[in-house]
Image (spheres, helix red, strand yellow):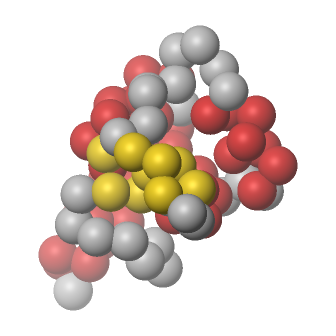
Amino acid sequence: MLTLMSKHLMGAQEIEQRLGVSRQRVYVLTQRADWPAPYDSLAMGKVWRIEDVEAWISKHRPHVARQALNRREESVDE
């Protein structure tokens, strides 16, 4: 289950959970030119707005976006 840092922000660990990838892969992704700019840098690391990360996922990893949507729809049906 994805635990969010807040209602609006994600750190590297949340991105790792959301995408189902390793910490190293999150680092590689966040270095890409097309990755959203961080919202802020804290002592624990950079944080991004959830809506920016989700927009990137929808554009660059649509299969991951669809999986999340399917999980949400299943939980509503229960």
Would you place residue 58 above or below residue 5 in this image? above
Residue 42: percent from the left, percent from the top? 48, 57
Lateral position of residue 31 relative to residue 55, left or right: right
The x and y percentages for residue 22 are 78, 56
Q: Nearer the viewer, residue 37 or 55?
A: 37
Q: Position of residue 47 (x, y in %)?
A: 44, 51
Q: Quadrant of residue 13?
A: bottom right
* Residue 18 in sight from this viewpoint: no
Along the viewing direction, whichever of 19 and 74 lies nearer the viewer: 19
Considering only vertical position in the picture, is 72 above or below 32?
Answer: below
Going 58% across and 65% down the picture, which residue do you hit? Answer: 44
Res 42 visible: yes
Q: Nearer the viewer, residue 61 or 13?
A: 13
Q: Residue furthest left?
A: 76
Q: Please identify the residue farthest to the bottom as the structure is shown.
A: 78
Quadrant in which residue 76 is drawn: bottom left
Query: Residue 51 placed where, x, y %?
Result: 26, 42
What count of labels does the image hold? 0
Residue at the extreme top: 33
Residue at (32, 35) in percent of width and height: 52
Left or right, 62 with reference to 25: left
Q: Going 38% across and 71% down the picture, which residue do you hit?
A: 5
Q: In this view, which residue lies farthest toward the front?
A: 43
Of the 4 image quadrants, the one containing the C terminus is: bottom left
Q: Residue at point 22% right, 66% down?
A: 7
Given residues 75 and 52, the one toward you in this image is 52
Seen in the image, is 76 located left or right of residue 64?
left
